[in-house]
Image (cartoon, rainbow, N blue to C red):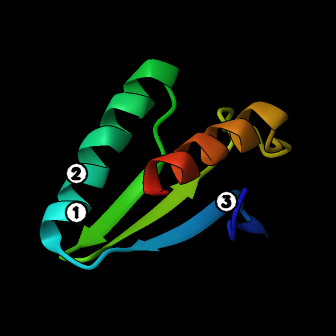
Amino acid sequence: MNNWNERSRPVRLEKRFEFPTYEITRDFLDRLGKLCEEHKRFPDISFGKTYVNLTLRPDSDDNDAKLTDKDKKFVSRIDDLFD
């Protein structure tokens, strides 16, 4: 879980990924899409020419929802895409 910021209100994990070119940004987004489909887990995504911001919230919308080990493993998989 490299450099993910854990926030508490609302509960979420956030990270910004930066890239040298648009082509590399686009490749990351394509691979991220495939990973999300495989895991049926879909973070909020915003991006520009050379960056991607991700926010992962708990699967549940309950007020007392918490991030799980499964969530933390998923963001580690996202980190693997960046490396």
Q: Quadrant of residue 21?
A: bottom left
The residue lying toward the viewer, choosing from 61 and 39, is 39
Residue neighbourhood size for the residue with mark 1, other residues' Cα within 10 Å, grouped as few (<14), some (14–19), many (≥20): some
Give SS at disc 2: helix
Kindly identify which residue carries mark 1.
24
Q: Residues within 10 Å of mark 3 (few under 14, many from 20)?
A: many
The numbered dot on residue 27 is 2
| Residue type, mark 1 in image | Ile
Q: Amino acid at mark 3?
A: Leu
- Report the Cα–Cα distance between label 2 and label 3: 22 Å
Residue depicted at x 13% and y 63%: 23
Instruction: Say whether marks 2 and 3 touch (CB < 8 Å).
Output: no
Graded by Cα atoms within 10 Å as few (under 14), some (14 to 19) or many (20 or more), the crowding at tag 2 reads: few
- Residue name at image x 24 percent, y 43 percent: 30
User: Residue 34 sits in which quadrant?
Assistant: top left
Give whichever of discs 1 and 3 has the lower sequence position: 3
Q: Position of residue 3 (x, y in %)?
A: 69, 71
Above-or-below relation of 32 to 11:
above
Q: Earlier in the sequence, mark 2 or mark 3?
A: 3
Q: In the figure, is residue 6 to the left or right of 48?
A: right
Q: Which residue sits at x=38%, y=24%?
A: 37
> Residue 61: percent from the left, percent from the top?
66, 38
| Residue at numbered disc 3 | 13
Amino acid type, residue under disc 2 in the picture: Asp
In front of the other: label 1 or label 3?
1
Q: Quadrant of the N terminus?
A: bottom right
Residue 53 vertical position relative to residue 67 in the rendered view, above or below: below
Q: Secondary structure at mark 3?
A: strand
The Cα–Cα distance between marks 2 and 1, rounded to whole angstroms, is 5 Å
Task: Give residue 6's position: percent from left, percent from top.
Answer: 76, 65
Q: Are marks 2 and 1 in contact (CB under 8 Å)?
A: yes
> Residue at 56% of width from left, 53% of height from top?
79
